[in-house]
Image (cartoon, rainbow, N blue to C red):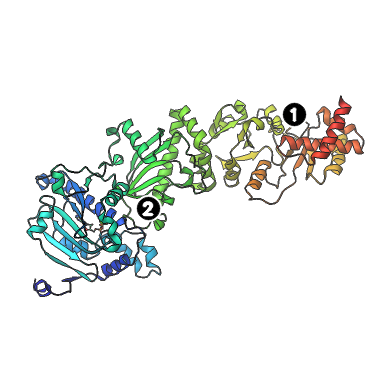
Amino acid sequence: MTQTAKNTDSDQPQHSFGADVSRLLNIVANALYTNHDVFLRELISNASDACDRLRYAAIQQPDLVEDNNNFRIHIYKNTDKRTLTIVDNGIGMDKAELMDNLGTIAKSGTAKLMEQMKDAKDPLKLIGQFGVGFYASYMVASHVTVASKKADSNEAWVWSSDGASGYDIREASNDDLDMLDGARGTVIILDIKDEGSEFLIDEKIRQTVEEYSDHIDFKIFNNTPEETDKGEGKPLNKASAIWTRNKSDITKEQYEEFYRHITHGMDEPLLTSHWKAEGVIEFSSLLFIPTLRPWDLYDPSRQNMVKLYVRRVFISDKLDGLMYPWLRFVRGVIDSQDLPLNISRETLQYNPIIAKIRTAVTKRVLSDLDKLSRDDYPGFITFWGQFGAAIKEGLYDADAHREDIFKICRFYSTHEDGEKFTSLDQYIERMQDDQNEIYYISGENVASLKNSPQLEGFRSRGLEVLFFTDTIDDFWLQNAQQYKGKTFKSVTHGNVKIDHSEETDEKPTSDQTSLIEKLRSVLEDDVSDIRISKRLTDSPVCLVAPEDGVDMNMERVLKIHQKYAGGSKPVLEINATHPLIIKVGDIDAGADFDDAALMLLDQARVIQGLPVKDPGSFTKRLTKFMEKGL
Ligand code: ADP
Ligand code: MG
């Protein structure tokens, strides 16, 4: 008390800040923030917390809110005085709380931050992982006055500081009490610096509230409490966080309205998933899968679209680590209970809590989709058509979720001749007893793949082959080689052993051996090997990739994406029982045989979607053979 009296007229504040607070204020003042808006977000969040806490306390002690149980927040400017005032009728602070909460660093998050900053090389980077809350006011204010009256107290106190070395505290005057919204709560008056002048414009206040605090579930007004009581002014926000409500209280229409609000879209959500995680980490999640693919789904930025809230306060709608890029089409809100209200979006993505949320949400989305495939198959197929290719990117870079992704993957297959989708589990169910591989053929579209000569032997033996037609298929296959212990095997790659019965490799006859020798002498520059095919039944020839090379289509795709420079020569397989091959075998070595050999190679190339080797010579040969034939 004596101290208070002594210092009243001096420039020195009564109380010094703790060393940690001084240091923190120093950092805040030195332009830590690039984005000034965050101070308002912090103050609204504190006001909303104060309302939350009183609301909770009033459950036990209803008389705390006897005078007014209508919680609300007011933000208004005074241009003449250059002040911005934030008023809440929440729980308020008593003298000790004002001193503890605003004069020292009591809260766990910031305390932890200061702890770590002691020996950090780059404190500015580090601070981004934590929030600085109330102290953010000093980004825009040269002086801050906090008048507060605790809900169950008769006293009111005023804390004030220029954010330099310390603060003053005094009992509230009648003028201070007049500024409160009723009989309790907190008033924060900011003396706005030049840097913060935009916050003396109502439009800026309104925009900032709309952007960051729309879903704070207390009404926020842009006028004084008296004006509101006279019925002037409408709340700036909707004052209702839909995701915090019970599922059973929300109609389909309300979900859809919220979906359209966040997507600015016209479509309806194909899937709405609303749930709460409770346990090691706590968060609410309200996510939607759109019906239609956005036009920029394949934009290289692969930007996440889910909004992150922390305790109903909007944090970011482009936090990279929150969702996997392959779930970038998912829209909605995740609201964490555990994260500090954060200031730097740059470091937030590396926060371990974010990683845990990502894992939990990913599992949930994948299991929701799996469920959709059982409950609403047509809906699921719509989804797969729009977003399947994006989801499959996850096979490449999210090992932990690979099994769950595979579970929802659908492919066309020879089983329905490419008319209907199959799952990998259905494929495995249909596999032959001793079959250990999941056969696939990859290429640009099902229609042309269906005619691939390489499929013939599989078809005739009743072996199912999947059609992989998305570019991404050739990429994930490099990382994800198995599903449920079955290896993916391309029918255009290497040797295949498709007679699963006791197979003895038949030796080629001497005629066949000599044909292969003759072909080899003509084609040795173009192919790495020539052999009798087990794949072919109807076509005379086909190309396959050598055992140690990259699969045919994968090579083509990699080349397009400039990820692959080398080229391995393909293997030419011939159908020894085909009449054409038998006839070619009868031609003696010489010009005619050479032409026939080159025509066979070109034929194999054409069906593979490759250009003929030399169009001029090809056309001459074709003309010659047609003349003879006609
Ligand atoms: P945090 O909100 O993360 O705890 P802040 O720096 O934002 O950190 O606030 C510090 C503390 O000050 C809060 O925890 C709260 O106890 C108190 N406080 C701040 N603003 C208010 C308010 N408007 N009403 C009641 N208490 C408040
Ligand atoms: Mg706070």
CA neighbours of label 2 inside 10 A, class few (<14), some (14 to 19), many (20+): some
Estimate the x, y position of residue 620 in percent, counting from the top left: 85, 35
Q: Quadrant of residue 375?
A: top left
Label tally: 2
Is the CB of mark 2 within 8 Å of ligand 1?
no
**Residue sitting at 27 percent across and 69 percent down?**
22
Dot 1 amino acid type: Thr
Estimate the x, y position of residue 495 in percent, counting from the top left: 72, 40
Q: Quadrant of residue 609?
A: top right
**Residue sitting at 82 percent across and 45 percent down?**
524
Q: Give the answer, above or below, for where 472 lies relative to 268.
A: below
Quadrant in which the N terminus is drawn: bottom left
Q: Is residue 180 left or right of residue 502?
A: left
CA neighbours of label 1 inside 10 A, class few (<14), some (14 to 19), many (20+): many
Mark carried by residue 353 = 2
Estimate the x, y position of residue 447 in percent, counting from the top left: 64, 30
Ligand 2 is located in which of the four quadrants?
Answer: bottom left
Dot 2 amino acid type: Ile
Q: Is residue 220 left or right of residue 448?
A: left
Q: Check disc 1 and report the residue beneath it.
A: 537
Q: Is residue 151 left or right of residue 337?
A: left
> Of all residues shown, which one is farthest toward the front?
80
Mark 2 lies on a secondary structure that is helix
**Residue sitting at 47 percent across and 27 percent down?**
378
Q: Nearer the viewer, residue 163 or 270?
A: 163
Dot 1 or dot 2, earlier in sequence: 2
